[in-house]
Each structure stands twice: as structure tokens, then as C-alpha cells.
Amino acid sequence: MKNPPLLMLSEVKVSYRSQTLLAHKPKISSSKDAEKVLRENWSDDIELLEECNVLFLTKANQVKGIYRASRGGTSGTVVDLKIIYAAALKGMAAAIILAHNHPSGHLVPSRADIDLTKRLRDIGLVLDLPTLDHLILAPFEGYYSFADNSLI
């Protein structure tokens, strides 16, 4: 009788399939460009619930896609960096821009926002998948850019 293998491993597959030509995707040249794309694709609950979305970019800073990383309550959301980077790697992103909203409209980053941004930056450096910016969006207008404020 033949011995069974010591380890029974599950197969892991990675795939990426684009639905549109890259030439039709917006290019991000500034935080204002990123804010525009994010607002156009944000949920209708921007003034009610906090959520985190991530733009996946090509090397030329064209948007490959947008990923909703988390959705929380009125005063916070849990952002799992492993999930963000797993999705970014699977989508063959060359860089990312993270964004979350503050339903209160208050655009000053919290200590947790600053710490998250530093962790994103550091992980991105290791993976050669840089975080170009982290935006905080107010419900109707206005945003805070960590890159524009030299915090990334």
C-alpha cells in the first residue's frame, strides 16, 4: 500500500483580466486627479459610513481598477493591509493610492491614519509596490492628501 503524501496542499491561482483598453483609463498626475476618480466611484454612503478604497495603477499611473478594501461604521473602518496588497499583487498593480472618507467632514488625519500611511509606505517599499498617496475625502467637497503634505 502506497503512503499518502505528507502534505495535501490546495492549489492557489492568480489571474488578472482587464475589461477595457488601457488607453481609455484615466491617468493620475495629481491628488486632484485621484480625488476625481475616487469620488466618481465612491458609494452613495460617503456622508454616512466610513470606507476605504484603493486605486490600482500602472507604471504610467493609469488607473487599472478600484478596490473597496473595507466598509465600516460612522466613525471608523478596519483596513487589513494583507488584503490590500494581496489584491494589488493579483491585479498586477505597479503602485497604489489609498483613500478613505471622514463622514464628519473633518479632514485632519488621526494618529491611526498617520500610522496606517507609514505602514503602507513601508510595506510598499519592500514589495516594490509604492503607495503614492493616501487621501481623506470629505462627504461633499474637500480632501486631504498625505503626499501633498509630505507625509508619505
Image (tube, rainbow, N blue to C red):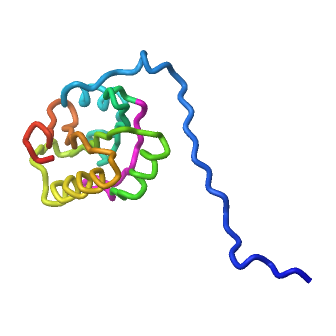
At 11% from the left edge and 47% from the top edge, which residue is drawn? 151
At 33% from the left edge and 56% from the top edge, which residue is drawn? 79
Q: Quadrant of residue 17?
A: top right
At 7% from the left edge and 41% from the top edge, which residue is drawn? 149
Q: Nearer the viewer, residue 62 or 113?
A: 62
Residue lying at the far right in this picture: please name it.
1
Residue 69 lies left or right of residue 33; in this view the side is right
Q: Position of residue 34 (x, y in %)?
A: 26, 30
Q: Which of 149 and 3 is in front in this view?
A: 3
Q: Where is residue 99 in the image (x, y as percent from the top left)?
A: 27, 42
Residue 83 lies left or right of residue 105; in this view the side is right
Check residue 51 for magenta coloring. Answer: no
Residue range highlighted in magenta: 64-78
Q: Nearer the viewer, residue 5 or 70?
A: 5
Check residue 76 for magenta coloring. Answer: yes
Q: Position of residue 132 (x, y in %)?
A: 23, 40
